[in-house]
């Protein structure tokens, strides 16, 4: 037991000596403490903090709106009928066929008409199941499908929003 006590005292002594030698590296500053300088530093920092916390000025950028013509020039009867049929589709797919994520509606603007025709036909026949679309396309004839597919294929590709 005595050995353990001697060992602990020895270790404690080493720790104390190491701490004392560490204080020799400390620089001693004998200048007087100046409260005025400290107050000036604090007010400068407070001003800087106020500047950083101040609300940012909003920059408003005004864009020129270009008046554009119709999305698709309705030059044929097929495109006119397709545009009329597509009015039901705007709610989900958007005016430009850009689709809407919230409604899980894909971007269809600019898609090939043969692809659209195939997909709508497959939904009508039940090969592809889409209950939401079925309510809109249930009564489409083959000619209606061809018309709306042709119109959608003429829309500019916008990607999904």
Image (cartoon, rainbow, N blue to C red):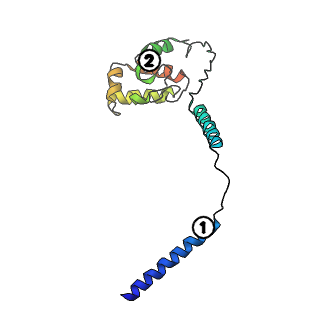
Whole-percent x, y for residue 137 in the image: 36, 21
Where residue 28 sits, quadrant-wise, is bottom right
Instruction: Identify the residue at image location x=50%, y=78%.
Output: 13
Instruction: Identify the residue at image location x=61%, y=33%.
Output: 47
- Give the SS element for disc 1: helix
Q: Residues within 10 Å of mark 1 (few under 14, many from 20)?
A: few
- Provide the residue designation for mark 2: 86
- Provide the residue designation for mark 1: 23
Q: Would residue 152 appear left or right of 21 to someone viewing this image?
A: left
Total marks shown come to 2
- Could you tell me how far apart the alpha carbons at marks 2 and 1 are, in whole angstroms? 84 Å
Q: Would residue 69 appear left or right of 92 to someone viewing this image?
A: right
- Give the SS element for disc 2: helix
Q: Residues within 10 Å of mark 2 (few under 14, many from 20)?
A: many
Whole-percent x, y for residue 43 in the image: 61, 36
Question: Above or below — where is 157 with respect to 36?
Answer: above
Q: Nearer the viewer, mark 2 or mark 1?
A: 1
Q: Earlier in the sequence, mark 2 or mark 1?
A: 1
Question: Above or below — where is 123 with respect to 96?
Answer: below
Q: Nearer the viewer, residue 41 or 92?
A: 41
Q: Nearer the viewer, residue 29 or 74?
A: 29
Q: Are marks 2 and 1 in contact (CB under 8 Å)?
A: no
Please state, as top left, top right, bottom left or bottom right, where the N terminus lies in the image: bottom left
Whole-percent x, y for residue 115 in the image: 47, 30
Whole-percent x, y for residue 112 in the image: 51, 28
């Amino acid at each position: 037991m005595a050995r353990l006590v001697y060992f602990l005292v020895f270790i404690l002594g080493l720790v104390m000596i190491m701490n004392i030698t560490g204080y020799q590296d400390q620089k001693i500053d004998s200048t007087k403490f100046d409260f005025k300088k400290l107050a000036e530093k604090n007010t400068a920092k407070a001003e800087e903090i106020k500047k950083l916390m101040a609300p940012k000025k909003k920059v408003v950028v005004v864009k020129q709106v270009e008046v554009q013509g119709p999305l698709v020039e309705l030059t044929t009867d097929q495109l006119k009928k397709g545009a009329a049929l597509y009015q039901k589709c705007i709610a989900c797919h958007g005016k430009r066929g850009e689709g809407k994520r919230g409604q899980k509606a894909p971007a269809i603007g600019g898609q090939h008409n043969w692809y659209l025709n195939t997909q709508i036909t497959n939904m009508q026949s039940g090969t592809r199941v889409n209950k939401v679309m079925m309510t809109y396309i249930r009564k489409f004839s083959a000619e209606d499908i061809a018309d709306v597919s042709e119109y959608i294929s003429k829309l500019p590709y916008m990607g999904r929003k």
